[in-house]
Amino acid sequence: MVVFRRTDVGGYFMTTIKFILIFLSITFCSCGQKNTKDKVDQAAVKFNNSAMAMVKYLKNADSSQKAVELLDSATRLDTNYYLGYFNKLMFLNSLKQYDKAILTTQNLIRLRPDAHDLYIIGGVFCEKNYDTISSKKYFQKSLEICDVVLDTMSFKNNDYEMIMTNKAVNLIMLNRNAEANALLKKLGETQSDGTMKKITLSLMGLNKNQLIEMYYSDKNSR
């Protein structure tokens, strides 16, 4: 599915999930997430680093499972190790262990409860796990956070377009397509960057299943 973050390619593409979406692909691990506390257990960091050495073998189930085990060790040692949880998502997605990915996302949300993009990720994993009731709650919460932020944010803010786009993503995932299309059209009309305008307008007319498929497709995971 699609979550946009300022730290990604072109200013927005977070990564996937072959994932992300575009939901969880190799770019996912390169977001440079900052840990939520100043000091991290160094033994946990070593487990994380060992796991990340296996990214190049992401499509190998045995390697991905080993990476998950290493990251499990990291987060057991340091239960507030944000990066350890975040990196784990990539491997769990590769293994299609969506139930465990949801639990991992819940830990990320525990550490960053106001991060609207984490709720989008959680919602997509619920969709992949055929739990549309739970996914709706995640997308609704993300939308609420986006609205609160946008209410006090100037359109000149560097993050304005990113949050507006993620708001539209939430609307699509909540089957509020008319609202999403209107928002995307308005946003696209104000964008001067041709690449970003193309990305924004490409989301118009998509339903939630098409959006998930779009970002899980092989061509977007490379």
Image (cartoon, grey):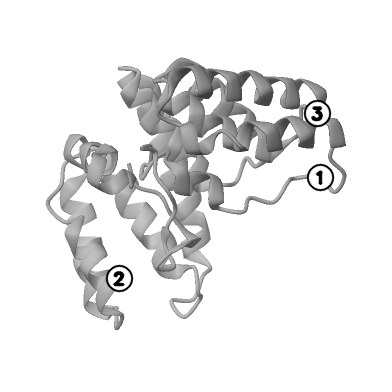
- Mark 2 and mark 1 lie on one chain; the one further toward the N terminus is 1
| Location of mark 1 (residue) | 37
Of the pair 152 and 163, the residue shown nearer to us: 163
What kind of residue is marked 1?
A: Lys
> Which quarter of the picture shows residue 59?
top left
Indicate the position of residue 82 as horizontal and vertical percent values. 69, 38
> Label 3's element?
loop
Is 31 rendered above or below residue 29? below
Determine crowd level at label 1: few under 14, some 14-19, many 20+ residues with C-alpha closer than 10 A: few
Which residue corresponds to the image point at 52% horizontal and 23% vertical from the top-left? 63
SS class, disc 2? helix
Quadrant of the image for the N terminus? top left
In the foreground, 146 or 99: 99
Q: Are marks 1 and 3 in contact (CB under 8 Å)?
A: no
Residue that lies at the very extreme toward the left in this rendered image: 205
Is residue 41 visible from the viewing direction of this image?
no
Q: Residue furthest bottom?
A: 192
Q: Amino acid at mark 3?
A: Asp
Residue drawn at point x = 70 percent, y = 38 percent:
49
Which of the two marks, 1 or 3, is nearer to us in this view? Answer: 3
10 and 60: which is toward the camera: 60
> Disc 1 or 3, which lies upstream in sequence?
1
Q: Which residue is mark 3?
A: 78
Residue 196 shows which numbered tag? 2
Q: Position of residue 86 (x, y in %)?
A: 59, 37
